[in-house]
Amino acid sequence: MSGVMLQRRGFLAVLAGTGLSLAFDLHADASSGTRAGPAQTFTPNAFLRIEADGQIVLIAPAPDMGQGVKTSLPMLLAEELDVGLDQVRVEQASLDNRMGPLQNAGGSTSVAKNWRPLREAGAAARWLLVGAAAQTWGVSRASLRTERGMVIHDESKQVASYASLANAAAQLSLPEHIPLKDARSFRLIGQRQNQVDGPLIVRGAPLYCGDQRPPGCLIAVVIKAPVFGGKPQSDNVFGINALAGLSGIPNGATNAPVIGSRPHAANLDALKAMPGIVDAFILEAKGEVSGDMVSRSVQPALQAAVAIVARNTWSALKARSALQVTWEPTAFDAHSSGGYSAESKRLLEQPGETWRDDGDVEAALKSASVTIDAYYELPILSHNSMETMSCLAEPLPNGGLRLTSPSQFPSGPVEAITSVLGIPKEKIELHIPRLGGAFGRRWEVDFALDASAIALKMGAPILLFTPREEDMRHDFYRPFESQRIRAGVDADGKLVAWDQDRVLHSFRNPQTPKITAEQFPVNFIPHLRIRARMVASNVPAGAYRAPPANLHAFFIESAFNELAYAAKIDPLVFRLQVLGEDRELKDTGFSPTRMKGVLRLAATKADWGDPLPKGRARGIASWFSHAGYVAHVIELSVSQTGVIKLHRVTSAVDVGQIINLHGAEQQVQGSVIDALSGALLQRITLNNGAVEQSNFHDNPMLRMPDVPHSIDVHFVESERSPTGLGEPAYPAVAPALVGALLSATGKPIRSLPLSQHDLSWS
Amino acid sequence: MLEFLLSVNGKQLGAQVDADTPLLWVLRDELGLTGTKHGCGMGLCGACTVHVDGQAQRSCQVPVSSLAGKHITTIEGLHPQGQHPVQQAWLKHDVAQCGFCQCGQIMQAAALLTITPEPSPAQIDAAMAGNLCRCGTHLRIRAAIQGAAATMLRAKAGAES
């Protein structure tokens, strides 16, 4: 027993610096010191095991939504353990309380958060295996090395597989400190690795939540009011209490919403009579449905809706088409995108709240040699992941739930179900499928709450299915924003004056918008002012890839490009001048040196400065987002009739150590295509309080013929700890694109998407 | 509801569904073939692509009643071991990211190469224009199709020589 205790304390000490405490999971028999007998599973920690048959299993802690963490995180384990990924089986972790925030996929943090803990977990296992060999052969640790799952004693030419050493390794204790590999010894990290699920994906294996069909599973479709937060009209003659006896309050759920069949303005009886329909009812709102304008945190809540439960999807969709429902009026029924735009311009005439005021911006603008005065607008964007919102909720005999939820933060749905539906979290299991894209949308918990509430009422497994139209009209959107920027350079071309007037729609964001009042270009321009106003809107807003840079970079970098153009300064030179001398700014963690590095790298690789014929031009932009530095150069042509042809994108990226070179390139190329698609084609507009778009015919995505053939990615080689790559390449794309158009045509573009503009020129 | 007998991946399979049920939902809900995906329900995204008598079709737009006497191939039946040259090329080039659109992409590409064994880049772009990819794997889709085309031509030349 004491051997186990030493091991436990030693291992916990190793991980103490990470702030985590990982529980042990040693097989009971192994801990008793039995040496003879059948092989037992070697499980030194929550992240890997060697099974009785010798199979090495690595656990992928975080959900894979196409950002490749089911491959890159196991690479960290495999590197320190000294096995190839081809030698192991990778398993997706379920929600595992031992792993804490290591399971969260968002904010481009999975790799950064897991970098040390997973390496330590792999190194600890290798330590024990080497120790077992040393003991067995009576040699020193120092005389042993490992390679591809083998411990090797070169001197005597003895080798032993990890599998053969697992039993003995389980008896050993860990020291206080286990060294990790030097970067120069990496065999896997930094190399190209094909993603582990590839063979399953290309065969159509049932990897996604919607592919699961447990026995007795029913399909649920949820229809929400076109105006966000609206409720179905109800007949007030019947009170809720009077109907409590008729409604479906499930046993054991003391806090469940009242789901009843009280009279309402929906033809639910007619739907229930349709073939294949099992039930149709009103899902009542529960909890706070949307935060107020200034609140940065919105409590999870169940939104009022009509729920249709059917034996198969087509029956549910036909019932949805047959649904007639009258929604209650709301205070937002007259809202429209045109109205938000008019309101933004009206608010700009007011002083607003001052977030920053350095120097004397009005005086500096007056004395500037060249100025610009530009008003920019960005639209609402929908996430449009290829897999629409889905969740499988299976009621358990103990009154709990087994969820298969494609959630970016797996603990989120469990907390929401506890607080809104009253199921204690000990009674909730959450299994993590593959996610068909997320981009921030699956950080939300609405789909898990809907599926769970319906499953508890029906007492049957419920697969929540969302048709594309509902998915596009009931998103947690990238919100709209407008900015007026007045800026000026002095006679030497130095950027001296910057007046930024912002009109925001409040949204939940891990980084409150006010933080941007401390970030670049603050402290880089002597006379600078930032003032903000809020538009009252009920549009549910959420994290969209690279918040808030997915808005902010466009305004700042476009203003830079316009000012450089007006002052006849090369936009690359302009940016290098603004960034100033090489230095590290400890307060903000922003390095002008690294920013200039990627600007120069992108420019060099893109042949910046080489002459181009009329109508063909390059644009440049850069941004520091989610701890990564990225610069893009976009080269395009514009015909005189305004047709754009994208020739080449050149991207320079500095995010520290690259883990999987395939995956890293994919994230940059994917971010570029994503941002081009948004900038060229996409917007969500409102009229009469409701979203006007519904599918890919009126909210299109970039198609193959319009994707550039060259997106060349260049990484700054670095041994800094990795900082993440899901988001940083996204923000600077749109301003580089618009900057190229400015250079090609002389026309500034100040709102997106480009498809709404006439780009013809002469 | 009617009983339909369908030829799917070389097997005769029965399903009791309404006549207007799109093939997509017969596959996913009745026949346990979930490789074919819903992305839009309007034939705009290509995630539901299958082969009907060798031609690429958007299964969300094909009513089950129209399939009498036709041979349906889904991603599960493209190759018995999942090693069609297009599938192999998809692995060699590490095409997928989230993977949700990729079965439709593979089916579309396989149909293209049957009809046009040596497609030009412009022909590839045009043929794949109906398949959306949200993650942005387009560059590798192009490379994989070109690689698969070359492999299939070499195999054909080898078989003929």
Image (cartoon, coloured by chain):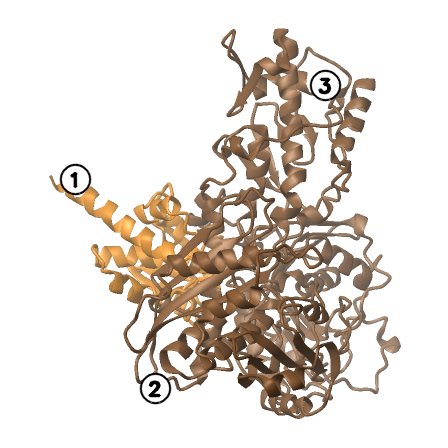
Chain colours: A brown, B orange
Quadrant holding the C terminus of chain A? bottom left
Residue A668: x, y in percent?
A: 48, 57
Q: Could you tell me if residue B72 is visible in this image?
A: no
Which residue corresponds to mark 2? A761
Tag 3: residue type? Leu
Point out the residue furthest to the right here.
Answer: A241
Q: Which residue is mark 3?
A: A172
Give the SS element for disc 1: helix
Looking at the rendered structure, the kind of residue marked 1 is Gly
Residue under the point 47% across and 33% down: A86
| Residue drawn at 56 percent across, 82 percent down | A377
Q: Disc 1 designates what residue?
A: B158
Q: Residues within 10 Å of mark 3 (few under 14, many from 20)?
A: many
**Contact check, label 3 and label 1, Cβ < 8 Å:** no
Q: Are marks 3 and 1 on the same chain?
A: no
User: In the drawing, what numbered circle is on residue B60?
Assistant: none
Q: CA distance from mark 1 to mark 2?
A: 54 Å
Task: Locate the N terminus of chain A and report the quarter of the image it occupies.
Answer: top right
Apparent side of residue A666 relative to residue A134 in the rendered image (left or right): left
